[in-house]
Structures are given as C-alpha cells and as structure tokens.
Image (cartoon, rainbow, N blue to C red):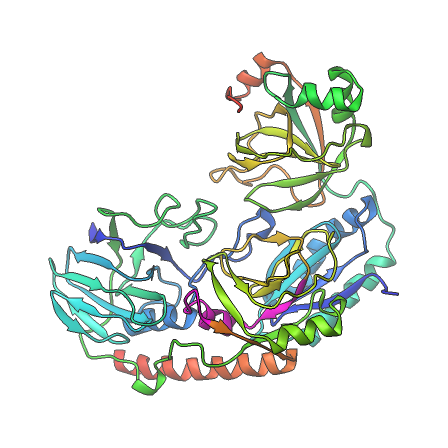
Amino acid sequence: MSGIVIENPGMLALLTDQGRMGQAHLGLTTGGPMDPFAFTLANALVGNPTNATVIETTLGNLSVRANKDILIAVTGAPTPLQIAGQPCALWQRHSVKKGQVIEIGAPTEGLRNYLAIGGGLTVDAEFGSTSTVLREGIGGLRGQKLQQGDTLAVGQSATPHRDCALPQSAIPTYHADAPLRLVTGYQYEQFSVTSRSRFFNSQYRISDQADRMGYRLTGPAIPAASRALLSEGIALGAVQVPADGQPIILLNDRQTIGGYPKLGSVLAMDCARLSQWRPGTTLSFEPISIEQAHNLLHLHHAKLTRLLQQLEQHHE
Amino acid sequence: MTEFPRIELASENALILYLDKHTSETVAATIAALLPQIRVALGDNLLDLIPSYNSILVQYHPLKTDHFRMRAQLKALLKAQSDKELNNEQGELVRLPVWYSEESGPDLAHLAEQAGLSVDDVIALHEQTQYRVYAIGFAPGFAYLGEVDERIAAPRLATPRKRVPTGAVAIADRQTAVYPAPSPGGWNLIGLCPQLMFDKSASPPMPVRVGDRVQFYHIDKDTFLRLGGKMETFR
C-alpha cells in the first residue's frame, strides 16, 4: 500500500540507506548518505532500524504527501520545514495525518537534508542496498532520482506517538569552521616537501564542479608527483591531484578505481562536513596521524552511541 | 629504492598493498591468490576489497579493529604467499564469443591498416591470447583485460564516441575490454560480444573476476544473433 507520494522532488531527491558495501569488485561504488550523522539521527528520531531507507535532498524544495498517518523527522542543513502549512522544527519527531503535505524548503545554509519516516520506506535492494547511484543507474526506484508522482510504501512503525527531539547542544553547525583533517598516505611520499607544504598552508575554494562523486577545488596548484600511475582502489575522501594541480576530494559516488596521484584521504566525518558546504566556500587541510584518526573515530562513535541511547529511552 | 611488496596507508580505514611497481602475469596471479586469503583472514573486520593492476585496497571496519592489527595480518599473508609456488593457471579461464567484422567493429579496418596487417590477422592476434583480468572499474562490470599483442595495440581515438553500445569489444593501447553498458568511449571498436558483462539479474552478475583469464573466439553474425546479441548502429 502506498504510504507517501512525491508532489515535488526539488533539484535532487534520492532514496538512500547506509550504502552499498562489499560490491567494489564489480565496479559498484558505495553511495549512501553524504551526511551519515544526519541520516542516522533522522532514523533514530522515528525509532527506525539504523539501515532504514530515507530520502536525501540536495538544496531542498521537496514536497511529500502522506497517504496514511505517519511519523517523520527531518535532519541536516537548517531549512524551513512545514507540515500542513505549519512551521515545524528539524531534528524532532512529528506526526503527520493522512492527506497532509510535508514541505522541506531551501536550506539557509548547507545543502542536504534527510527525511525519515517511521517504519522506513519499503524499497527493493539492489546488490544489498537501496542507495541510489545515478552514474551507475543502481538502487532507488529504477536507479534514478525521485520524480513527481512517485509513490513509496512505508513499513510498519512500532514507535508510540510521543515527543522526541535531539538536544539543542547536539545539533551540528553547517559552516566551514575548521580545516579538513587528512590522513596522509597513498603517494604522499612522492610529493615534494614544497608541494606538501603548499597544500597544507593554502586556502582552497570549492568549485562549481562539486557533486556526490567528488568536490573539485581551485587554489594554488600542487605539482603532480607522477603522471602514469596504474589505476588503483580509491578510498572515501581520497585527495587526488590531476595534471593541472587542482585537488579533487572523492566522495560517496566516486569511481572505485583511478590513476591520479593521491596525497591521502580526508576523515569520513570531515567528508560529511564538506558535503554540506556549497561551491564558493573556502577551506584548508590539516594532516593528522592514523592514531589521531582512530581516536577521533572512537570518540565520535561514543558520542553518537550516547545520543542514540537517550533517544531510545524516549521511545520506551 | 622502494621495496615491494609494501603496504601504505590509504585512509582512516584502508590500507593499500602494492605487489610490484608494474603489473605482470605473476603480479596478477599473486593478487588472484591473495584475495580469498585476505577475505578469510580478516573475516568480519573486512568491509571491501578493491583489486587492481598491481595493488589491493583493503577497507576494514575501523571500530572493530585498527591499522596495526590489519597491517600485521596483511604482512603475514604476503610473507606466506611469497614462500608459495605460484601457479600461472590461477583464476578461471573464461571463453567469450565475438562477432568480429567491419559491420560490428567500425574501427577494425582502420586498426588493421595502421598495423600493416590484414583484418583476419588482427582477429587472429586478438583471439590467440589468454588475457588476464587486471582490474574492474570505471563503470559496473567494466573489466580491463591485458595485454594485447603489441602488433595490434592502438592509441585511443582522438575524438571519443558519444555512445559505445553494450557488448562492444575494444582495444586501447595494450588493453582490451567488452563494454558492459552503453557509455561514451574512446577505445577502438573491433567487434561485438553477445555475452553480457554486467547483468543485475544474473548470479553472479559478471562472468569474470579480477585474476581470471579471458580468451575470445570468433563467431559469425548468425551465431551472434542466436546467442542473443543485438544489432547496433555506430556513429
């Protein structure tokens, strides 16, 4: 049975779960939410399992009509949210009656929002995941972005109708406030000391060529370490330097292999921050050790776990 | 000088193994032998493996394990592997039919002319070699096969085609491939293969894996059509 219908998909509305792992040997990339924290919280707020399918919007302007009574939460970039014409808060659970329309406006800052629905959206998985990757035509509905008139079934929601909101202090900010942390690796040693120092001491600007595949930057050119590199596996956040010396940060929908020299990879949690920044934003990089990276990951995980436990108590 | 094999950091949750500076039959066979061993040794800690020409990217679960343990485990596997006799027969031999002709391969005549060979010679040289699957990527199901006989190696087209059809058999430099889906492409097209290289509904979805060997054999147009091949127009 139909749970919701898309009245206006906006610029880019994609169905996504946590992403497609373990299929790289077929040339299939991971996809998945660009801002995993906002994705995870959207599901948690409506009491969904961690891998439930939600809608990710880029630059908002999504309207969805409920075809039955549902629970929803919208997270991510600060954006006007209305239910049946009434302004509502983000990072909070809301009930929506049958026939009412949920409208996500244009974000005032940042790019991406997540709309989770209690019970999750029922979508057939491809290669173990519902995540849409447009370049591959895999996942979502028909491998494409959501279109006007698309209907989606909603699973059974076990959540009682009680208030549930993320504490104000836990809501992230979405402006470029600190350098992107980079674990050096791959061909790092092959870049000259001057090149490395220029890279870490310069400001780069996000160009208009910034999408789910990768963010192309403009700024002081980094002389490439070598030209003919055999194609090799690309990790999330890998910073590659093509012949023109302008770095590219490779994100969720990146090709699985590539042959440009790489300086290392941006931390996944910083890729999430980056993916909320718009073209024109300036940023810089900071090298960190693998030990620091692992410490940060564990710290982040601990905080997230605590938040999820708090929300869990609301559901009981 | 840099020693091989070596292990480098790639990201907060990935290490990359470089088997050698270049690729070769031996390197490809070593990678094919290592992949299942890494899967078994890393178990639940493994997220994904991306094998390629001379490397394997190993992505692991960073909250379940750490890079010290991963590095140690991979080092042990490399050490054990280096003590083993390598068998060049590593990987399956997959035979793929090709309808070679000027009708199905618009660059065949030009490639032959550039090589100073007859069209039949080009076909004979293309189908006599057992190619190694060096990498899969670029698009789902796109398998890079090598190496073609140097007499029929050909540079990419100066102007790539806007659309290369599914099944197009192509050569670029010393590599050859079968297009898994329509896409833009600058490789020289010499024939059509009726076997799908990527089929979402099939199990497995690809007829080859990295490390397998591929040999082509020629078929005529009728056989091509009987095997489910579709006629294509080229621009």
Name the quarter where the C terminus of chain A is drawn.
Answer: bottom left
Q: Residue A123, percent across and down?
A: 34, 51
Q: Is residue A103 above or below residue B205?
A: below
In the picture, measured across the screen, residue A227 lies left or right of residue A121, that is right
Q: Residue A296, percent across and down?
A: 54, 82
Q: Residue A304, percent across and down?
A: 42, 80
In the picture, measured across the screen, residue A193 lies left or right of residue B166, that is right
In reply to whether residue A274 is colored magenta, the answer given is yes
In the picture, measured across the screen, residue B178 lies left or right of residue A171, that is right
Q: Is residue B65 visible?
A: no
- Which of the 4 image quarters holds residue B37? bottom right
Q: Residue A285, percent across and down?
A: 57, 76
Magenta residue span: A262-281
Q: Is residue B93 visible?
A: yes
Foreground: B191 or B199?
B191
What residue is rendered at 83% in x and 42% in y?
B88
In reply to whether residue B124 is colored magenta, the answer given is no
What residue is rendered at 76% in x and 23% in y?
B114
